Image (cartoon, grey):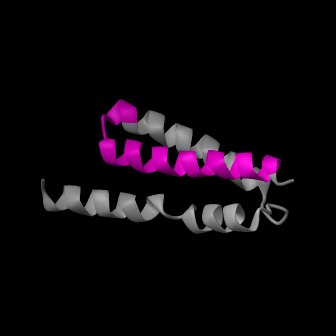
Amino acid sequence: MTGVDILGYSAGAITSLTFLPQVIKTWKEKSAKDISLLMFVIAAVNEVMWIVYGALLNNWVIILTNAIVLAMSLTMIYLKFRYK
């Protein structure tokens, strides 16, 4: 593994954590009233596009990072409807 690979996977790991605090907060409080549904729908669509792009490039950093963020975006969409 090269230094560039390590940088890519490290950046991907940090990026993957971007929505985690919001997911945890929403889950604990069982409230999503102040959460923007549109923001997470846009994020989910964006992540799907990045995953397709990563697949076309055969770039696992892009694929894995965005798959994790997609999972969190979809979780937030689910929680928004569940705790509405």
- In the displayed image of the protein, which residue is found farthest to the top? 56
Q: Choose between 37 and 23: the one closer to the eye.
A: 23
Q: Position of residue 70 (x, y in %)?
A: 55, 46
Q: Position of residue 68 (x, y in %)?
A: 48, 49
**In this image, 41 relative to 21: left or right?**
right
Q: Residue at x 21, y 60 (%)?
A: 6
Q: Residue at x 71, y 63 (%)?
A: 26
Looking at the rendering, the stretch of residues picked out in magenta corresponds to: 55-82
Q: Would residue 64 be counted in the magenta stretch?
A: yes
**In this image, 8 relative to 52: left or right?**
left
Q: Residue at x 45, y 61 (%)?
A: 15
Q: Choose between 49 and 20: the one closer to the eye.
A: 20
- In this rendering, is residue 2 above or below 50? below
Q: Residue at x 15, y 62 (%)?
A: 3
Which secondary structure dominates the residues rendered in magenta? helix
Q: How many marks?
A: 0
- In this rendering, is residue 44 above or below 3? above
Q: Quadrant of residue 45?
A: top right
- In the displayed image of the protein, which residue is found farthest to the left? 1
Q: Position of residue 84 (x, y in %)?
A: 87, 53
